[in-house]
Structures are given as C-alpha cells and as structure tokens.
Amino acid sequence: MNRLLTAAPVALVVFVAILALTAFAVRIGFIPDDGVMLWAGAIMAGDGEFSIGRIVAAYPTLPFIATTLVDVVAPAGTPTPALVAAMLLGVLAGIWFLSFRAAGLSLVVAGAITLVLVFHPALLRAAVAGPADMFLVVFLYLLGVSLYRLRFRSGVPEVMRVGAALLGLTFSHPMGAAIALSATPFLIFAIQPVLAASSALNIVLALVFPTAFAVGAFVYVSWVFPGDGWSFFAAPAEGLSAWLAGMSSTGLAGVPILEAGLAMAAALVLAAPLVPVVIGLVRKRRPLVAPAAVFATSIVAAAGMTVGSGFFGEPASIAVAAPILAAVIIACVPIVRERLVLVTSLAVIGWFGGALALAVIDPRGTSHALALFEGQSDRDRLDALALGGATIDRQGVLVDTFNAPAVVLGRGAARGLVAPSHETFALSLLFSRIDTPFVAVPNPQSIGGAQDRVNRAFPLLYRNGTPGYRLVYQNDNWRLFERQPRASASQLQQSTLVKSPGTGD
Amino acid sequence: MPLSPSDRALGNLLVERHILTLPQFDEAVALAETWNVRLGDAILARNWIDPTAYYQGIAYYYELPLVDLMREPPDISLLHAAEADTYARTLTIPWGRRNDRIVVATAEPGPQTVLSARQRWGTAIEFVVASKFDIVWAVQTAFADQLSHRAVFELAEQDPGMSAQRVCTPGQLIVGYGLLTSFLLGLALAPIATLITLNVAMSLFYLGNFIFKGILVSAGGGRNPENDEAIAIAARALRDEDLPVFTVLVPMFREPEMLPVLAQSLRELDYPLGKLDIKIVLEAEDHETIEVARTLGLEGVFEVIRVPPSKPQTKPKACNFALRFARGEYLVIYDAEDRPEPDQLRKVVATFRSLPDDVACLQCRLSYYNASENWLSRMFTLDYALWFDQLLPGLERLNVPIPLGGTSNHFKIDILRELHAWDPFNVTEDADLGIRLTQKGYRVAVVDSTTYEEACCHAGAWIRQRSRWIKGYMQTFLVHTRRPLHLIRTTGFLGFVGFMFFIGGTALCGILNPIFWIIYLVWLVAFSTGLDPVFPQLLLLLALLNLLAGNGVFTYLSMLAPIRRGWLGLIPYSLTVFGYWFLMSIAAYKALWQLIYSPFYWEKTQHGVSNHAQAHMRAVETPS
C-alpha cells in the first residue's frame, strides 16, 4: 500500500499535465480522425443510438468500450478521449515508477526517468491521438515486460501474461493487431531454450491462442449482429496513402516496406538510445538480450507488414515503441541500476531524439501538429464542431455523422440526431425525400464533403436548399436547414436560401 | 537412538536360534537405531524371515507361550466393542481366563505393555504372545458386526446433517418442489418471461463459472515455487528417527494382479519401512486378492484388513473399517495402481510441521503415467493437470474449501477420527470430506508432490468412473447446501461462492451444456427465429459471450494446464477438448440417473488395463 502511495504523486502529475495538453489539443481542433470517430461513437453508444451488437462489434474494441463507459459517467461536455488517455498515461507512469523502484533505482532517479519517458514526444503524440494509441502503449509495455518474464520462467502465469498482452494489443489499435501478428514468429526466441527445444510450436500456440480465438469470436459476433467483422483488417487506406506520401518527402529508400522498416528502426535508435547501449553492455547474457530483440524485431516487422499488406492503417502510431522499450529495459535489465548516470543521460538524449524520430516516422503528423500549435487551426474540423454546437437544443437533425463525427462532438450528444444508423435516415435517402425537422449538409467542395451521404443523395441541397426548409445556420463548410411549418403552402413556395454568410440563429 | 537392552537381547536370541543371521541382525540394529523403532519393526520391515518365526523367537525370549488366535480365538465375553480400536492399536487383547486370571495376548511384550495391561485389567493377569496379524484378525473377526456398523453408520448417527445417507432432506424437497411449481406456473401464465428468467439464470451461472475458474487458474499459477522448494529441502533434511508412524490405506477390490505393483511402489517410498503401517483393505468376499496377498510373501509391515460384507459396498466404508486398526500419526490413502513420488511422505510431514495446527489434510497432485496411451488418456491428463496443478492451488490461495481428489490425501489421523472419517454413502467421499473439514474449522492445503495413476483409456470405463464422480459431487452439493447459512458462516462468502461453482458448477455444467449446444445448433442450422423472444438482445449478447469466451477460456485453460510439467506435446490436444466435454455430459446424465435410482452404487474402476500398466506389471513380476 505504501508503495502505491509513493507512485500516486507521479501518476497525478502526469494525469493533470496530459489532461491539460490533450484538452488544449481538442480546443484547437487537433484531434486525429480516429480520435474523433472514437469519441463520437462513444457518445452515440452512450446515448443509446448504437445497438448493442454495433457496440460489441466496434473496433478498436477496448478504447471504444472504455471511452463509452467514461463518457456515460462523465459530465456532459467532458473531452472523454482526453480524459481516458490522461488516465491511462497517469496509471502507466505510476506503474513505471514502481517498476523502476523495484529495479533498484532511487526515488529521485526513478521519478525523473519516469517523467522523461512519460513526456517523451512519441508518448505525447499518442496521448493527443487518443485512447486507442494509449491502449496500444499500455499493452505494448505489458508485452515487453512479459517477454522478459517469459524468458526468465516460462510458467503458466508468464504464458498468460504474454497471451493477454497480444490480445490487448490486437483489440486496442490496428497497429496493435499488426504487432501481435508480426511478433508471432519471433516469440520462439523469448521462450526458455529448454522448452523451445522440446516443443516450440506448441508453446507458441498457447501464447497466441487467446488472440486467435478472440479474433475469430469478434468476427463471428460481427456476423451475428449487424456489423462488419472484417473492418479492423482494412483500416482506412487513405491514412496509409497519406503516410506514404509524407514518407516520400524524407527521401528514404523508395521501397515502401523497406522505408517503413528502416524508419521504424531509425526511430527506435534515435528515440531510445539507451536500448542499444544497455543491450550492448549485456550482449553476452542472452536471457537479457533475447526479449528486447524480439520486441524490436516485431516492431520493425509490424511497420513493414503494415505498409506491405495495406491493412492496419498507417504505422506512425508505433513510434511509441521506443520509449516503451526503454522503460522495459530499465525495469527488467539489472545492470541499469549500476549505470544510473549513463542511463539517465541516455533517457534525456532519447527525449530529443524522440522529436527527431517523430519527424522520421510521422512527417505528416508532425508538420500538422506544428502548424496547429503555431496557430493555424483545422478549419474543417472546427466548422463541423461549430455546426454540432448549433444543433444543440434542436431535435431531429438529419446529418451524416459517420462522415462527420465531429458534429456529434460539437453537439455533445447523439440523441436528437438522425444518423445513418437510423431507419429514417435510410428512408430519406432511399426515397430522396427529407422529412426531418432539420437537415445539415457540408460543402461539397470541402474535405470529405463529397463523401457525405446527404450530399450524394441531394447534390443541390447545400447550394439551393430544398422546398419547405429554410437556412437557420451556416459557416464556411456547413449549412443547417429547418423545416418550415406546413400551415402555409405559399410559405413553402417562398422558402429560399439565405445567402448571407455567417448567418445563424 | 540406541537399541534397548531387551531388544538387543531379543536380537541375540534370534541369532542364536538361527532365525536371523548376524549380518541381518547388524542391519536390523542399524535400521532400528536410525529409524527410532523397535527391533521387531525393523526386522519385519525386511523380508528376511517368516513373521511366525519372529514371534516364536519373542515368545521364547519372554518365556511366554505363543498362541494362534485363528485356531484359538479370544474369549468373546472378555472383549468390549468400544475397545476394539485400542486392541488393534496396542496389539494387545484379552484372550481368555485361567485360574481367575485374565490371559492377555500381545504382539509386543515388554514393560510398557505390562503397565498398560495392569491399568486396564488389574494385576491378576498373565501374558501370551500372538502375532500382530493374529491380533488384528481376531479383532476384525470378533467385532465384525460392530465395526462394520460403525464403518457404515457412525457419521450418519453422530452427525446426520453431514451424511449423504439421505439424498435430500424434506426441506430440500420442498424447495425443489416449490421451484418446479413456480417454473411450471410461470410457463403457464407468462411463458416468455419465465423462459427468459431461466435463461438469464443459466447464462449468469455460466458467466460466473468461467470467470471463477479463470481466477482460480490465475491464483493457482501465482503460487510461489520457492515455498515448494523450501518444503522439498525441509523434507530431505528430516532425520529418519524424527519421522512419525505413517498409516497407508490401500483399498482394493478384485485386483490381485495389482498387488505386486502396489507393494513395489510402496517399497520405493523414501520413508523408513519400519514406520509404515500399511493396510491393504480388501472385501472379505474378495478371496482371490486375499489369497494373492497371503502367498505373495510381503514384508511384515503389510497387513491385510478384511472388510465384512455389508451395504453400501463402497471404498469409504472399507476405509472407515480399516481406520480402526490404524496406528499412525498421519494417514494416507492410495489406490492400487498409484505410484507416489518417493519423497511424498517426507514432504507431507515437513509441510504439516510448517503449517498451522488447523491444517488437517494435505492433498498431493495427481497425474497419469499413461498419458500418451490414446486421445482419451491425453485429455484426461490435461483435465487432471488443470484440476490439480492449477485449480486446487487456486482454491487453497483463495481459502475456498478444497474437494479432496481420489487418492493421496494425507490426514492427521486424530482429526480424521474426530470427524467420523469418510461418508460411506457418498461416492466421492474425499471431495465431501474436504468440504466437511472446512466446515468444521480445519483447513486443507496442497503439497507439491505428485502421485501418478493410471488414466482410464476406454470411453466406457471413463464414463462409468466420471459418472460416479459427478454423482458424488451432486451428493456433496446436496449435503452441504442443507444449511446454506451455516455453509456461508463456516466457509465465508468466497468459500460459499467457490463451493457453488466448483462443486455445483462442475456437476451442473455437464447437465446444461447439451441443452445449450442443441439450442445453438438449431439456431445456427435452421436460422430459426423461434428462439428470438427468449433471447432479447442483451441476453443474446450474454449467451454469445458465454459461448465464445466461455469455450475459449476453458480451451485455453486446458492448453495452459500441461505447461507446469513441461508436457508441451499435450497442448494441441486441448483444441479437441469439446469432445471431452461431450463425454462429460454423457457421464453427467448417467450420474443424474443414478442419483435418483441407485445413489450409493459404486462404479468400480478397473485398474491395470492400459498398455503402460500391463508392461509395468510384467516388469515387476519378472525383475531382471
């Protein structure tokens, strides 16, 4: 209990700092697409707008369920993903602090290294990216530590821990699934040689069975309930394309798989220089080297596999692997306590290296973040949020929330929106007839505007409006129409578009 | 401890009379001093001489007549049933009257015997010598009816609430009848709501069951191996002279071929043979095994206890009968085909001495030596590995009552007697006793020592054996839920929950599984919507969770089970565990049927049928 209490201040400091950072990011509209979708989905699920089947078939499952649960209990308007991310990183900071203390580090050194690692650029990026990335962080750390324990004693609890880590990774983030998959062939090297020699494949089977079974079960549940069990296999391809485009600007090898692998390897070395140094010091002690090697190889392979397969989205999220591996090494390699100055220095160097590594592994995200923090806001995102704000107190708003989930965030609730999951929405589009009290439509020229289902069904709605509806709100990218009372047919005829920009109610 | 002068003189006499050779005498002296036993115990622990010759030597030394109690049985009028235990344990029995003096027959003449005999029968006594086998036989014969009655009815008479003699109490019948009536009434008045309620109850039970087992495995896996290593070291450090007398009960029935194998396994125990009080417990009608035991020429530490015929003819009844003759401080039960690890008894002694006094029983791990015989033996081994290596240590850590398993449970004999030993009406008397121990304020712990057994490798035999186990679990469940509040008070809330899931759940799962499989198949194959009203979306989700997570978790637990022993070759077989569950359900329904129609019938498992066991028997019979 006393040990836990010593970790509480560290966890609290991290929680508050990360919450402030992520809340600021939300305020300036710097929420990654995945984060917006997750948050909006959580709000919709919390408001009962999702069927249970859709909730259990949601992916990434763990962050979605966690965000939904927190959103249900948190006061309205709370930036739930930021809260969840801050909580996870706070808890992780506490765990790291305790692990470092258990590894023999003094209170001050353990606290300092914990803070340096927790505020590592890659982890800050993950915190801003939202709960999915933070769950990835947590389970990646669990995997790293579990691999060391597995190598030390390949007993039942150790096998269960690795199994749980792989399972958690898979259901935390598409990249987690990629890491779990890419780690599988290398797990043999993390097992005690005696066991590996007797029946290596069988013990690997025991390690990956929970994940394999859970994936099968997840697909099956998605088949039973309305949903798509294969969605997590095909993360947005545009994310990967954009990442590749960003990578091409770095002038790397030109072969995407190789580029990704090289970028990841470089990021690992740059962002966690203590890993190669410490491993070099203990290179003759295989039990201390093998787990780190398995971890690093899996990460590099996952990056390459992601690009090569086209599944799992963009690999930028695994930039977090570097500080995590550094934390694993500090917690599990005993020599660390004898080289405190070296290790602390390398951890600090790793912080600066981490910023550089982010530029290598996530050039697009880095430039985007820099632009935002320099004051250039994300106009599209802010407009969608503003439209959501304009729908507050208005019930029955037909809007494609799947295409523009930020609307749900701006409104702070899903109840009252007629979303694509509603039968009314489907019927409106099927019969090309709008009969809801309100309808919101994005500018077809805006990013994502062309994909909007309402826009595609009513191509002239944004520009001309529709009979019986009048414009009640608009901004640079969105317009909101309200149905006029049916009492007067002449009024219906007169419904026209109000052309002055910035009009609101 | 140095040999007593009388023992040394007795030894000299035996040598002088050429009953014993000088080297044998020297070895016997060394053994007696090392083991801290009487010279006679050391001599009888070696198969050097016919025990009769030994007792002739004793009689000669003490200048007492030697009597054959089989030909000249004791005078019944001098015997008291209440003292039967004492006769058997002290190996001293009043034999007859001569000139107004009581003639006392003893297998252990000496100052201590004279003293205790005078306290019991006064100074007007004289002694004759009889072999311990004769005395034990005489007690069995003289008190056959009384001992048999005690063996069958002691628990039922002394503690009726804990006996399975009555399958259900009137209160349980009323509750059951009430539940059935409510269900039928519900079906008539609100069928969908009633079925949904039933469905919810069953789904929650499944959910709780697999979560609980997962917690147990996690807790059991977290057992500190350093403690086990410390016990192993402490066991090795125990000096022979400090070890107590250990009673070993081996109940057998019509298994004459197993006797040589059993004797060999017991000889291999790393425990002074002179401190083993081995009772081979046979039914009196089992003439074939008795004859083999007689002709096998076993060492004097082996005694045959003949259990008079009575109903129910069960192993616990036989053990209760034999318990009257036990002389050890501790007691263990082995089956005929068991092969305990040699240091098991030492580990047990070391563990008992390291644990608090309220630990009354230690359960060793069980596993199979013929795991690779066929699919069934492999699955059975996985099952045992999960049960004994993961779940039982989990129960121990969480302080949940441990149902003792089959064999290799070691008791403090005084506490066993205090609790009226085993319930002869319960066909898993060991599981019942484990729960009863907890309810009476004692604890059961697990020892890291394995006894290897023979796995049933034929489906028919397996189903018979398993049906007995499940029936016994049903009996145990019914006995201990007669007073639910008492159960909660004595075992704690977690203990109660553990009991419900571990004892009740094991039996109920086998019954419920086929019902859910059929529902699922109908739904899957026929795309039937008829069941939809009974499965509202939330319940459907729970049912799917049970189906997927439940099956996944149990398959995974089976997969983990062999890792502790390094039997990684068994891991892939866990993927076929569904077939094993199917057999389990057949056994469960057979058990339910038998619970109603023949609750006390003992489905005997035939041992020595596997290729491995037969090869071993041949090897023992024809040593190189």
Image (cartoon, rainbow, N blue to C red):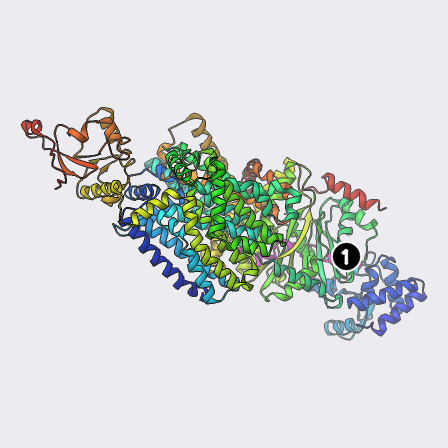
Judge from the rendering whether residue B105 lies leftward or rightward of residue A477; answer left or right: right
Q: Position of A141 compared to B430: left or right?
A: left
Residue B412 coordinates in the image, percent (x, y): 64, 62
Task: Establish if A76 lies above or below B56.
Answer: above
What is the crowding at mark 1: few (fewer than 14 residues within 10 Å), some, or many (at least 20)? many
Q: Amino acid at mark 1?
A: Trp
- The magenta stretch spans residue A360: no
Extreme top residue here? Answer: A431
| Magenta stretch secondary structure, dominant | helix
> Viewer-proximal residue, B278 or A194?
A194
Residue A448 image offset from top left, x and y in percent: 28, 34
Q: Quadrant of residue A238?
A: top left
**Whole-percent x and y of residue B458?**
66, 36
Chain letter behind tag 1: B
Is residue A214 among what the camera can see? yes
Residue at 35 percent across and 33 percent down: it is: B533
Left or right? Give the position of A459 relative to A362. left
Identify the residue shown where x is 91% and y is 69%: B12
Q: Secondary structure at mark 1?
A: helix
The percent coordinates of residue B504 (x first, y second) are: 50, 47
Looking at this view, is A104 or B236 the one in front? A104
* Residue range highlighted in magenta: B133-162
Q: State the residue lying farthest toward the bottom.
A: B123
Front residue of this view, candidates B329 and B234: B234
Magenta segment: does it hold B136?
A: yes
Q: Nearer the viewer, residue A495 or A206?
A: A495
Residue B604 visible to the viewer: no
Which residue in the protein does label 1 denote? Answer: B137
Q: Quick check: A224 above or below B342?
A: above
Quadrant (top left/top right/bottom left/bottom right) for the N terminus of chain B? bottom right
Query: Height in image: B84 above or below B503?
Result: below
